[in-house]
Image (cartoon, rainbow, N blue to C red):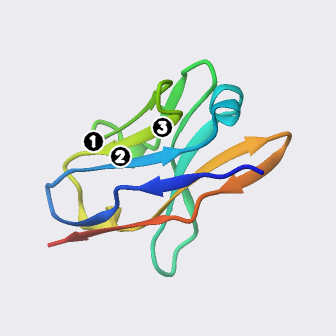
């Protein structure tokens, strides 16, 4: 069974920083692409950043220069480092991986940016 465990959300003021962590099993981490999505109230879930098994990354235009996705092989984890946070970055952030063509989501972690 594929499990994704997220952590690191919280409440931060505009301009602040947070780092989200998503951990999974070693097998999933080493063989499957992973990504961060987010969903604000009343809005559709959107892709924020992804990282391939080869380490290639892609970042959503609206967060480029502020967010960074990375991974740690020793901890079987990916991270989303978020700097210069804006109110519009608020939402539930979800970790996603795809295994054998099937999507697996984490439980989500809440990020609230206050003005």
Q: Position of residue 64 (x, y in %)?
A: 35, 39
User: At numbered mark 3, what does the secondary structure look like: helix, strand or loop?
Assistant: strand
Using a 10 Å C-alpha cutoff, classify the residue at mark 2 as few (fewer than 14 neighbours), some (14 to 19) or many (20 or more). Answer: some
Residue in the foreground of this view, choosing between 1 and 17: 1
User: At numbered mark 2, what does the secondary structure look like: helix, strand or loop?
Assistant: helix
Q: Position of residue 91 (x, y in %)?
A: 41, 69
Sequence-first tag of 3 and 2: 2
User: At numbered mark 1, what does the secondary structure look like: helix, strand or loop?
Assistant: loop
Residue in the foreground of this view, choosing between 45 and 12: 12
Using a 10 Å C-alpha cutoff, classify the residue at mark 3 as few (fewer than 14 neighbours), some (14 to 19) or many (20 or more). Answer: many
- Where does label 3 land, which residue? 78
Residue at 35% in and 46% down: 63
Locate residue 105 relative to residue 92 in the image: left or right: right
Residue at 61% in and 18% down: 54
Residue extending farthest bottom: 42
Locate residue 109 relative to residue 25 in the image: left or right: left
CA distance separating discs 1 and 2: 5 Å
CA distance separating discs 1 and 3: 17 Å
Quadrant of residue 112 in the image? bottom left
Using a 10 Å C-alpha cutoff, classify the residue at mark 1 as few (fewer than 14 neighbours), some (14 to 19) or many (20 or more). Answer: some
- Where does label 2 land, which residue? 63
- Where does label 1 land, which residue? 66
CA distance separating discs 3 and 2: 17 Å
Sequence-first tag of 1 and 3: 1
Circles 1 and 2: CB distance less than 8 Å? yes
| Figure check: 87 above or below 54 | below
Residue at 19% in and 49% down: 84
Residue at 52% in and 44% down: 23
């Amino acid at each position: 069974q594929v499990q994704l465990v997220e952590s690191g959300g919280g409440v931060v003021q505009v301009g602040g920083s947070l780092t989200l962590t998503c951990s999974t099993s070693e097998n999933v981490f080493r063989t499957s692409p992973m990504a961060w999505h987010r969903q604000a109230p009343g809005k559709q879930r959107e892709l924020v950043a992804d990282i391939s098994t080869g380490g290639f990354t892609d970042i959503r235009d609206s967060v480029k220069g502020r967010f960074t996705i990375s991974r740690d092989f020793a901890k079987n984890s990916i991270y989303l480092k978020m700097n210069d946070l804006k109110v519009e970055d608020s939402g539930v952030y979800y970790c996603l991986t795809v295994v054998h063509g099937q999507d697996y989501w984490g439980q989500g972690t809440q990020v609230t940016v206050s003005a």
